[in-house]
Image: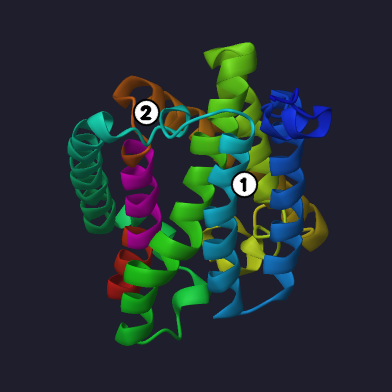
Amino acid sequence: MRYPPRPYLSSLRRPAPTWVAISTVVLVLLLTNVAAHHWSMPWTLVLSLTVTALLPAIVHWAGGSWADMGLARPTLARGLRWALALIGIVALVYLCGALLPSTRDLFTDQRTSTLTGGDVALRVLVTVPLGTVLLEEVAFRGVLYGLILRRNGALAATLISSGLFGLWHILPSLGLADAKPALGGIFGDPLLEAILVNAGAVLFTAAAGCVLCELRRRSTSLLAPMGLHWATNALGYLFGFLLR
């Protein structure tokens, strides 16, 4: 004799609503951002890797797939080609900026002034790709973009995920005016400078998020924005170290 399925088992098999999944991702990222601001290495790296592993599970909970996150296997080769090309372009732009006296000072950063060669190698090869790029790209261009895309389309996915990406940088941008001398000393008032620099960083990263989303859309792969993101951050550390 066959028994009808139990209602609670059917509800467990049913995908979660997309808006619930999006809200869950935002809450997880909010808690992660606050924790990362108060923790130090290596705990922040462990936190980033843990959250990166958790986020795709939320997509699958909502009935999504690896393709929704830009990680479908058939798109990886194309995404890798995009990533390598973008890394080459960023390296060329940084090299030109380092050679021009008018832009060389932009590489000056107090946060890297005491780093050794080993410290820079650790950031370029471990901290940036695994602690920053992997989490942020999976979270914003992968999971959030994919979930919002299914519900509201590409434009909304780009604007919302990029806006959240900008807000994600509020805490990391605190003290940026002191760390980057080229950004300070313009307005005379330290508090005003700190506010404007922080707001500028949020707007800049939101705009950068739009570019990264477009790369993900055009390449159909998350590897393309990952390549650009790693290049701008990691090569920035490398050139800042070499030019100090």
Asked if residue 187 shows in the view, the reply is no
Q: In the figure, is residue 45 to the left or right of 128?
A: right
Look at the image and tell me in which quarter the N terminus lies. Answer: top right
Name the amino acid type tagged 1.
Ala
- In percent of width and height, residue 69 lies at 46, 34
- Residue 95 vertical position relative to residue 143 in the rendered view, above or below: below
* Residue at image location 35% in from the left, 61% down from the top: 234
Q: Residue 215: which numbered mark, if any?
A: 2
Please tell me whether residue 150 is drawn above or below residue 32 in the rendered image.
above
Identify which residue, 178 or 91, lies in the foreground: 91
Circle 1 SS class: helix
Of discs 2 and 1, which sits in the foreground? 2
The amino acid on which the numbered mark 2 sits, given as a three-letter code, is: Leu
How far from the left and from the top, in percent, is residue 206?
59, 35
Q: Answer whether residue 231 is magenta in the image.
A: yes
Magenta highlight range: 224-234
| Closer to the camera in the image, 128 or 61 | 61
Q: Residue at x 38, y 71 (%)?
A: 126
Residue 199 visible somewhere in the drawing: yes
Give residue 228's quadrant in the image. Answer: top left
Mark 2 or mark 1: which comes first in sequence? 1
Q: Secondary structure at mark 2?
A: helix
Residue 73 is situated, as x and y percent measured from the top left of the image, at 28, 35
Magenta stretch: helix, strand or loop mostly? helix
Kindly report the distance in space between the C-alpha atoms of the residues bearing marks 2 and 1: 21 Å
Q: Quadrant of the C terminus?
A: bottom left
| Figure label count | 2
Q: Nearer the viewer, residue 74 or 157?
A: 74
Residue 209 among magenta residues = no
Q: Which residue is mark 1?
A: 201
- Identify which residue is drawn at 43% across, 35% down: 66
Res 78 label: none
